[in-house]
Image: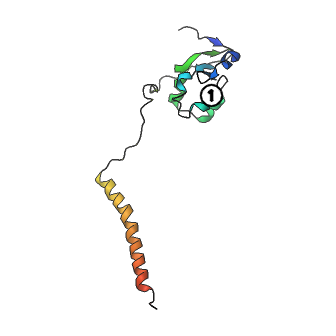
Amino acid sequence: MAEPRVFTLSQVAQHRSNKDCWVVINGRVLDVTKFLEEHPGGEEVILEVAGKEATKQFDAIGHSKAAQNMVLKYQVGVLEGAKVEEVDMNDDVVDMESNSKEMSAFVIKDGANYKSTSFYEFFVPLLVAALYFGYRCLTVPQY
């Protein structure tokens, strides 16, 4: 495997616009320009740290293992003098680019159990209110 390109922080600082955006995370220099629109937190979050060392901000958010491994996809080099740790690629990582248009969600199926539950949740309070007002009408003294 070829040696990664080495960049200084001043070289990285030249790439801080939404058309050319680089950040440094854990000593890795990343070109995240194509990722700006896909970032779940919005592109503004990345642009705030564009051209800078962003490891503290990245770690503070608590990114998933998939997001941490995605760093390798955007790596263009390493920061001069930084010690870069190898990333464990044994975990099953979903290719986020291919799934960027998909959304995961929980599905509630329209089973008999669900329909009966919604029936009781609506009509039991209604029945209790009707019984209460009926009782009040019958027990209020007539003037």
Visible residue check, residue 26 = no
In x, y percent, where is residue 66?
50, 29
Instruction: Point out the residue furthest to the right here.
Output: 10
Residue at 63 percent across and 34 percent down: it is: 60
Q: Name the residue rendered at 30%, 51% in the picture.
A: 111
**Residue 114, image quadrant:** bottom left
Q: Amino acid at mark 1?
A: Leu
Q: Residue at x 39, y 79 (%)?
A: 134
Residue visible at 60% across and 32% down?
44
Q: Describe the colour scheme in one phrase.
A: rainbow
Q: Residues within 10 Å of mark 1 (few under 14, many from 20)?
A: some
Query: From the viewer's perspective, is 126 left or right of 16?
Result: left
Question: Would you name the residue on which mark 1 appears?
Answer: 47
Q: In the figure, is residue 77 to the left or right of 38?
A: right
The local secondary structure at tag 1 comes to helix
Report which quarter residue 117 is drawn in: bottom left
Residue farthest toward the left in the current orientation of the protein: 112
51 horizontally vs 68: left or right: right
* Residue that extends furthest to the bottom in the rendered view of this protein: 143
Q: How many marks?
A: 1
